[in-house]
Image: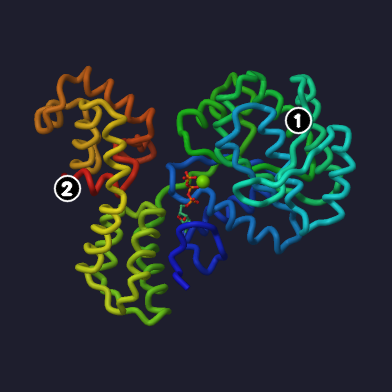
Amino acid sequence: MNPFLISAYISPDYFCDRESETKTLTDNINNQSNTVFFAQRRIGKTALIQQVFYFLKKKKTTTIYFDIYATQNLKDFTNQLANSIYSLFPENKSLTKRFWEAIKVLRPVISVDELSGSPQLSLDITQARQFEKTIPQIFQFLDAQNIKTIIAIDEFQQILNYPEKNTEALLRSCIQHLKNVHFIFCGSNQKMMHHIFNSAKRPFYASTKSINLQKINTGVYAGFIKQHFEKQKFKISKEAIDLILELTDCHTYYTQRLCHEIFAKGIKTIQPELVLQTINEILLDNEGVYFQYRNLLTPSQWNILKAIAIERKIEQPYAQKFMHRHNVGSSANVKRGIEALVEKEMIYYTINADKPYYEVYDKFLMLWLQRK
Ligand SMILES: Nc1ncnc2c1ncn2[C@@H]1O[C@H](COP(=O)(O)OP(=O)(O)OP(=O)(O)O)[C@@H](O)[C@H]1O
Ligand SMILES: [Mg+2]
């Protein structure tokens, strides 16, 4: 089996580090605190939740995970919540049965999802006022089971896009009274998550503990890569490992993906040449998508993106040096371009570093741009 996972979480055996984050999250749960964290895309937020849940399940804690990225409003949110509780079945038959009793008045309908083939539950709620009752009812139902329950809501910033403006107040007021149910809120949009949890005037302010999820330490990742290749009788040179981590900037998904593809080749001795060959193949595979990005951006935005890729990290994009070297126009132009690129999640502004900097979000796109 390929030990470098690029999709679903399996077990701690294939999971690199995150020891202190796992401990803090677990401690918070044991101390009945809710936790929030946000981090860049593809850094391993969802996998961290799954790792914590892996341990919790062994301790007879009910774990509920749902991702609200695709939800548009409170109705979708409620259905998603009800669905994820319903899907605890068959692990917990009696709970599901009691849940069914509790929501019977909402005329739940089960259908089969055409894409996934799994059962989908939807509730017959038409009036806005009904949500204000239904969500607290569902949470209170869980609380009343006297089983410790952790609910992780992924891509939580999405609630800011709902047309119902009272969503934060509604959620905050119903979760603060729960005794057995605790929450993990997670999201990838820095600005929106900050808005929800750090604005003094908003309902969630000071209601949660936060953790800071950054890139995995390079030395630790290097050890993980070496160990997994060697375990399956591969030989990998130190130079090859360093190159993998340099090319992918130790950004979890990209590092995993490159290792996954190298492993898949089945060549038992791994040197830097093989790493370069593999990365070239990945970039070539993705090229169609990169050309599409170019069509979606203005020529000026594309130039700025390319300039940032070449710099890898840029602290002062408004400095003359940067603007001259890359011929990206006036500082007003660069400012507008950068704002648009951040908004489109093409570049990322890292603020929790000594000196904040901009970088291209997608590490493979960055490498491709550097070569054009
Ligand atoms: N600590 C880890 N060790 C090994 N692989 C990991 C680790 N964390 C994440 N991964 C892998 O990296 C990939 C990206 O992780 P994940 O999907 O959790 O990121 P994310 O931050 O939730 O991304 P997104 O913002 O796109 O939702 C996944 O394929 C996952 O299996
Ligand atoms: Mg995720």
- Toward the bottom, the furthest residue is 233
Vertical relation: 231 (above or below) 189:
below
* Residue position marked by numbered label 2 in the rendering: 371
Instruction: Give the quadrant of residue 275.
Output: bottom left
Q: Quadrant of residue 4?
A: bottom left
SS at badge 2: helix
* Beta carbon at label 2 within 8 Å of ligand 1: no
Observer-nearest of 28 and 102 = 102
Q: Tell me whether circle 2 and circle 1 mark residues in contact (CB < 8 Å).
A: no
Residue 270 in the image: state x and y as whole percent: 27, 74
Q: Nearer the viewer, residue 203 or 331?
A: 331
Give coordinates of residue 351: x percent, y percent.
37, 35
- Residue, disc 1: 174
Give the residue drawn at x 43%, y 42%. Answer: 40
Can the viewer see residue 35 in this picture?
no
The crowding category of the residue bearing disc 2, from other C-alpha atoms within 10 Å (few below 14, some 14 to 19, many at least 20), is few
**The disc label shown at residue 41, or none:** none
Q: Residue at x 9, y 28 (%)?
A: 324
In the rendered image, is residue 263 in sight? yes
How many labels sit on residues?
A: 2
Give the residue type that dot 1 points to. Cys
User: Against 276, is 157 above or below?
Assistant: above
23 left or right of 44 in image: right
Query: Taking 310 as reference, is 137 above or below it?
Result: above
**Which residue is painted at 19% across and 20% down in the image?**
331
Q: Secondary structure at mark 1?
A: helix
Classify 10 Å Cα crowding around label 1: few (below 14), some (14-19), many (20 and above).
some
Q: Amino acid at mark 2?
A: Arg
Percent across and percent down for residue 90 are 78, 58
Which residue is painted at 48% across and 38% down in the image?
188
x, y percentage for residue 112? 70, 47
